[in-house]
């Protein structure tokens, strides 16, 4: 691509250079213009050959410009372009010292580019030349084109789900969304630790609220319905063959994450249930999967909801409400759990709540409150990085991976084991609980590892902040390569 781009540039500059002959004609015209002519000069007659020559040049120039423009468009909008990885993220860091400003600028840019059809997109298909889909995986009865997801928090208000799908993700999780709008914690609240590609955030679930998100997703659904000549109601009642009603794209799933408002007392289980149920009422029609967030570390008391009693009550209420969704296919329900509550008793409590409430799966991982042992030995942080690393909030980045992998394996075992040993769970018919993994996944090898440990989807967030908009494509390419290598 670089060579052809260079060639185009060379032909363009050649076409733009004025010819010597043209320059001479111009000069002689300028010098003649000082003496007034006694007889009116005859009108200048362009030699036929020269007119033909100029037309040819104009044509060459036009063609050159078109080819150059197209080459630039093709390169800049392709997720494989290294510029998305090596130029854009450092440029954003340089231009926006505050990580949250960079996030908003990135989101805004992607949204605007999408409106003009100029957004980055994945051009290699998940289907190979022989018609096979080497990365396909079936989740909740839908065959996903690939098992890479974009984790919650990147698109908190569901402004750019289609842009994120265009980047190649099989799953996009929007949110976390709270019932009422809330500002979250005071700024600054996101901090970078570039030496280890990590970050700390204490957003505190800033959200425009469930009504606003329902409006945004409703608008998206109406546009889709119009594009296929149906009404919104027809889509909800009948669906479109092969197209999940949330993602509105074949082979993809849209997860909508819900949470409680900060002001809602976490000890008042009925009030907590009302918060989540309100979100479900408003958002379930637009979701393939509803995700119950009880693991963000920045809402005081939220993680306490992971205890078996309140969790069972909360999840049960969400499942019940999800079943009431006025739609042909009801959304599935998952719960997102923290990587820090990791002793056997805590995990068994979650597993018990999952089975007893009828939730369909677990998203294993989130940011961590821990700091000890996170930074690898031998890595030196600058004093600013050290300060950022120690900020209050949840840490995310590649160093979470080992814990994520361990937890996925343990949850897989516990979830499968519970169905076998427990009364009331008919293991012969109970579908296996689905696991999505999040935390420190940045490359294809890691994605394959969590999938082999029992997850169905590997999700990324911080990896995209440092790796740019081609991250999902790169991870999938690495996975395909690894799978190919194994065949040999
Ligand atoms: C800035 C930021 C905001 C986040 N917001 C949310 C959120 O709203 N809800 C949630 O469940 N997780 C949120 N997360 C956690 C991510 O979804 C993800 O689980 C976590 O960062 C670990 O994955 P990673 O190492 O790939 O980033 C957020 C993470 C970051 C860095």
Image (cartoon, rainbow, N blue to C red):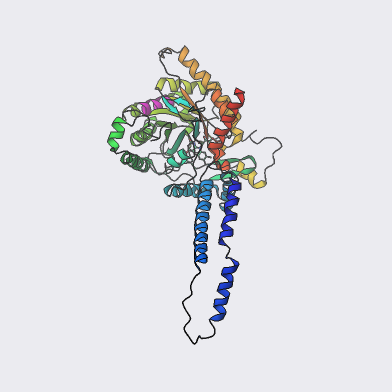
Instruction: Specify whether residue 237 is in view.
Output: yes
Out of 278 and 467, give the one closest to the viewer. 467
In the drawing, does residue 247 fall left or right of residue 296? left
Location of residue 223 by image quarter = top left
Q: Quadrant of the C terminus?
A: top right
> Relative to 295, is 100 above or below?
below
Up the image or down, 163 lies above or below 482; here it is below
Residue at the image point whose x is 55% and y is 21% from the top? 410
Query: Quadrant of the rendered structure where residue 361 is?
Result: top left
Is residue 314 highlighted in magenta? yes
Quadrant housing residue 160: top left
- Main SS, magenta region, reads helix
Q: Residue at x 43, y 40 (%)?
A: 162
How far across and how far down the image is residue 158, in percent?
42, 41
Front residue of 89/416: it is 89
Q: Which residues are magenta?
A: 311-319
Where residue 270 appears, x then y in whole percent?
37, 30
Q: Residue 233: where, in percent of width, then height? A: 28, 35
Left or right of 425 in this view: 7: right
Q: Is 34 contained in the magenta span?
A: no
Depth check, front residue: 209 or 26? 26
Name the spot of residue 363 as percent of width and height, x first.
Answer: 48, 29
Residue lying at the far bottom in this picture: please name it: 38
Q: Is residue 236 left or right of residue 1?
A: left
């Amino acid at each position: 691509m670089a060579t052809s781009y260079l060639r185009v540039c060379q032909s363009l500059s050649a076409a733009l250079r004025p010819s010597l002959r043209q320059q001479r004609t111009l000069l002689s015209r300028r010098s003649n213009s000082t003496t007034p002519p006694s007889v009116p000069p005859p009108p200048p007659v362009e030699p036929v050959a020269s007119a033909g020559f100029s037309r040819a040049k104009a044509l060459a120039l036009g063609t050159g410009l078109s080819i150059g423009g197209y080459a630039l468009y093709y390169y800049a909008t392709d997720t494989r372009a290294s510029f998305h990885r090596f130029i854009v993220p450092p440029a954003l860091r340089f231009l926006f010292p505050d990580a949250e400003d960079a996030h908003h600028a990135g989101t805004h840019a992607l949204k605007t580019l999408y409106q003009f059809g100029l957004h980055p997109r994945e051009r290699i298909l998940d289907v190979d030349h022989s018609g096979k889909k080497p990365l396909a995986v079936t989740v909740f009865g839908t065959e996903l084109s690939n098992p890479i997801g974009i984790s919650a928090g990147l698109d908190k208000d569901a402004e750019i789900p289609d842009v994120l799908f265009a980047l190649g993700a099989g799953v996009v999780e929007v949110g976390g969304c709270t019932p009422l709008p809330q500002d979250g914690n005071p700024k600054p609240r996101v901090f970078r630790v570039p030496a280890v590609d990590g970050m700390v955030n204490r957003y505190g679930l800033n959200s425009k609220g469930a009504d606003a998100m329902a409006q945004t997703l409703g608008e998206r659904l109406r546009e889709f319905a119009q594009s296929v000549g149906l009404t919104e109601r027809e889509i909800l009642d009948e669906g479109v063959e092969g197209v999940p009603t949330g993602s509105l794209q074949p082979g993809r799933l849209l997860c909508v994450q819900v949470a409680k408002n900060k002001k809602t007392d976490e000890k008042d289980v009925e009030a907590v249930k009302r918060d989540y149920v309100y979100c479900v009422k408003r958002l379930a029609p637009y979701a393939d999967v509803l995700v119950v967030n009880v693991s963000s570390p920045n809402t005081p008391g939220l993680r306490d909801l992971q205890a078996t009693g309140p969790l069972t009550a909360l999840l049960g209420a969400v499942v019940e409400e999800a079943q009431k969704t006025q739609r042909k296919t009801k959304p599935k329900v998952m719960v997102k759990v923290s990587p820090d509550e990791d002793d056997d008793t805590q995990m068994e409590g979650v597993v018990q709540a999952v089975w007893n409430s009828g939730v369909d799966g677990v998203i294993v991982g989130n940011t961590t409150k821990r700091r000890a042992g996170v930074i690898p030995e031998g890595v030196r942080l600058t004093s600013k990085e050290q300060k950022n690393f120690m900020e209050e909030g949840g840490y995310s980045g590649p160093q979470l991976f080992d814990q994520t992998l361990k937890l996925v394996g343990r949850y897989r075992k516990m979830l499968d084991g519970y169905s076998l040993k427990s009364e009331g769970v008919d293991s012969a018919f109970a579908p296996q609980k689905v696991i999505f993994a999040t935390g420190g996944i940045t490359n294809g090898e890691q994605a394959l590892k969590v999938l082999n440990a029992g997850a169905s989807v590997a999700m990324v967030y911080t990896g995209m902040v440092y790796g740019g908009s081609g991250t999902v494509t790169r991870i999938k390419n690495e996975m395909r390569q690894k799978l190919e290598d194994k065949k040999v």
